[in-house]
Structures are given as C-alpha cells and as structure tokens.
Amino acid sequence: MDLKSMVRSVPDFPQKGVIFRDITPLLQDPEGLQNSIDALYERLKDEEFDYIIGPESRGFIFGVPLAYKMKKGFIPVRKAGKLPYKTKQKEYDLEYGTSIIEMHVDAIQPGQKVVIVDDLLATGGTSKVMVDLIEAMGGQVVKLVYLIELEFLNGREQLEKYKIESVIQY
C-alpha cells in the first residue's frame, strides 16, 4: 500500500510557504491506519526495549497501538500541566517562544530502554528535548521511529548518535 499517497498536502498552513503533511486521510482509512502501524512495527520488531514513549498528541496515535501489539508499556510525554502526578520537566525553544514537556517522575527507572514513536520528524527539536528528558531520568533511548520525515529540515542532525527510521520521506 502506498501510504505516502494517503497523506494530504495542505499548502500555506500554518503559515505561507509551508506545506503541511496532513495524516488524517490515512488515519480515516482502516487499511491505511493498519498498514501504518504495521510499517512502524517492522522498524521496531528486532529491537530490545522496555517502553514506547510518544509525545502528545500524534505520538499517542501511533505509540499506543504499537505498545499493545508489542506487549510493551506506553509512556506519554505531555505539555506542562497535563499530567496528574509529580513530573520531571524540560523547557525548550520554539520558533516563537518556549514550551515545556513533562513525564511522570516514576515513568522510567535508571537503565530502562525506550523507543520514541511519533508521526513526524521535522527539525528534530521536540525529539531532542524528549531524548534529553529521558536520559536525565536515567533511561536509554534505543531508537526513534517516525511515520513521516521531512528530510530537507535535517532533523537527524540533532539526533545523530541515535538510530532513526521513518516510513515516508519528503
């Protein structure tokens, strides 16, 4: 199945000159969704790890079904103020300001191995801050897997010491 053909390109969103890669048509298609999960699974099936970590919100879409399929736990990474228990936070820069992500303080024990699953690798900023947070908690990032990679934004440069795979490339 050609998953790339199921991704809608929306010009000038969220600002002029940007082409937004919209995965909602792929998610709406039962076979497209199933094949997306299966393609991500193929990139993880030979890895040894304890948890799948996914960022809010599209990392949840792909991370939870993969965790279920692989009989692993899922750890959510959320924006500040969204998790109910004590958290560990990391602030990072955005194009127009800063943001904070967080995980529960007991989500990862030192030495546990994790993979990060998300829908998109663009500049690598969000993934890098997740890696930094995971490592600050004593976790080890085994691999990062994405449905889509915008290669022209060179996101891999921020993550060059990690194994990275993507299903669809632009």
Image (tube, rainbow, N blue to C red):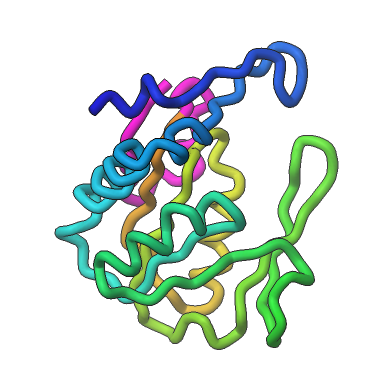
Judge from the rendering whether residue 132 lies leftward or rightward of residue 156; answer left or right. Answer: right
* Quadrant of residue 65 within the rendered picture: bottom left
Seen at 34% across and 67% down, the residue is 67
Residue 167 location (% of width, % of height): 32, 35
Q: Tell me which segment is drawn in magenta.
A: 150-170
Seen at 71% across and 15% down, the residue is 12
Residue 161 among magenta residues: yes
Quadrant of the frame with the N terminus? top left
Residue 19 among magenta residues: no
Seen at 70% across and 12% down, the residue is 17
Residue 39 location (% of width, % of height): 25, 43
Residue 31 location (% of width, % of height): 30, 39
Q: Relative to 81, is 61 above or below?
A: above
Which of the pair 161/102 is nearer the observer? 102
* Quadrant of residue 156 within the rendered picture: top left
Quadrant of the frame with the C terminus? top left
Seen at 20% across and 49% down, the residue is 42
Residue 19 location (% of width, % of height): 61, 18
Judge from the rendering whether residue 133 lies leftward or rightward of residue 37; answer left or right. Answer: right
